[in-house]
Amino acid sequence: MSSSTHSYSPSTFNPQKPSWNDVFTSSDRDSETCRIEERPLILRGIDVNRLPSGADCEEEAGVSSPNSTVSSVSGKRSEREVTGEDLDMERDCSRGISDEEDAETSRKKLRLTKDQSIILEESFKEHNTLNPKQKLALAKQLGLRARQVEVWFQNRRARTKLKQTEVDCEFLKRCCENLTDENRRLQKEVQELRALKLSPQFYMQMTPPTTLTMCPSCERVAVPSSAVDAATRRHPMASNHPRTFSVGPWATAAPIQHRTFDTLRPRS
DNA sequence: TTCCAGTGATCCCTTACCTCA
DNA sequence: GTTGAGGTAAGGGATCACTGG
């Protein structure tokens, strides 16, 4: 993010409270009063970064951002935010805005100052959503409107989600590649084994197929013949009805671990 | 107690503006 | 000077939860 061409004046930016925790000790999302206070100011035709000229704009006067950049005109505004009072305030606050600015439907863009961004980031780290009280307090601290803080958090959450999606996507891609490799390797192994099976002289040189013994009750398998003997000695069931079958020398007695998606995730 | 309209908050998608290469 | 891409503030619709009548 560049602010080189903007006339940021961080010196005039004066965060009132250094600590977010000091500002918000309660996490409640309550209070009718908050809702009333939160009612945003009309934007149309107003420089959101400029102090409102009218005294009627006092509510936002202390809150508006006198320092953060660009003359900003929001072209549109949510209908639900427009109340009768707001309309009156809008008219009041719009005084002093030039006609061409007023007539201008294109919206100029606000750029947050570095300090504002830092504070917003810090507060986002602590909670990625804000209750009305927190929003108002933060807006006041930053010299922004509550709506701007709200929008910033909304967009920030979207960025976080997008980043997470990218990470997940990358991870799944790697999983897919690994599985493809594994599949290729196994296919190759199958081919080799088939070739071995078809070549008698090589087959003759090999040790005879291992006899596996499986206990019918616990379904444990012992691979080597010595192990089978041991198992027979230890486990009476194995001597009675050992379920035996022949497998190739490549057989493994280790149970196959079914990996879940979570187990595939890289440990962080 | 249930239904319903109103309201606020949030998410998601999109637009518009700004900056930079 | 122009242009296209990328970043981001903001608008607006959809949805959900809550509340009061």
Image (cartoon, coloured by chain):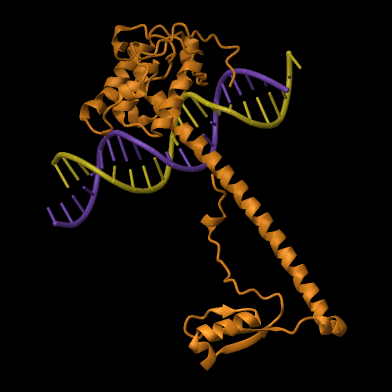
Chain colours: A orange, B purple, C yellow
When the figure is inspected, residue B18 is found, relative to residue A156, above or below; the finding is above
Residue furthest out toward the bottom: A240
Relative horizontal placement of residue A43, taking residue A263 as reference (left or right): left
Relative horizontal placement of residue C4, taking residue A228 as reference (left or right): right
The number of numbered badges drawn on the structure is 0
Which of these two is toward me, A177 or A45? Answer: A177
Inspect this view and state whether residue A57 appears.
yes
Relative horizontal placement of residue A64, taking residue C5 as reference (left or right): left
Which of these two is toward me, A103 or B19? Answer: B19
Inspect this view and state whether residue A113 appears.
no
Which of these two is toward me, A84 or A163? Answer: A163
Name the residue at 60% across, 11% down. A5
Q: Position of residue A198 (x, y in %)?
A: 83, 82
Image quarter for residue A197?
bottom right
Image quarter for residue A28?
top left
Which of these two is toward me, A43 or B21? Answer: B21
Name the residue at 68% across, 55% down. A177
Q: Position of residue A120 (x, y in %)?
A: 44, 24
When the figure is inspected, residue A21 is found, relative to residue A227, above or below; the finding is above
Q: Position of residue A184 (x, y in %)?
A: 74, 64
Q: Position of residue A207 (x, y in %)?
A: 76, 82
Identify the image quadrant of the C terminus of chain A.
top right
Identify the image quadrant of the N terminus of chain A.
top right
Relative horizontal placement of residue B3, taking residue A55 as reference (left or right): left
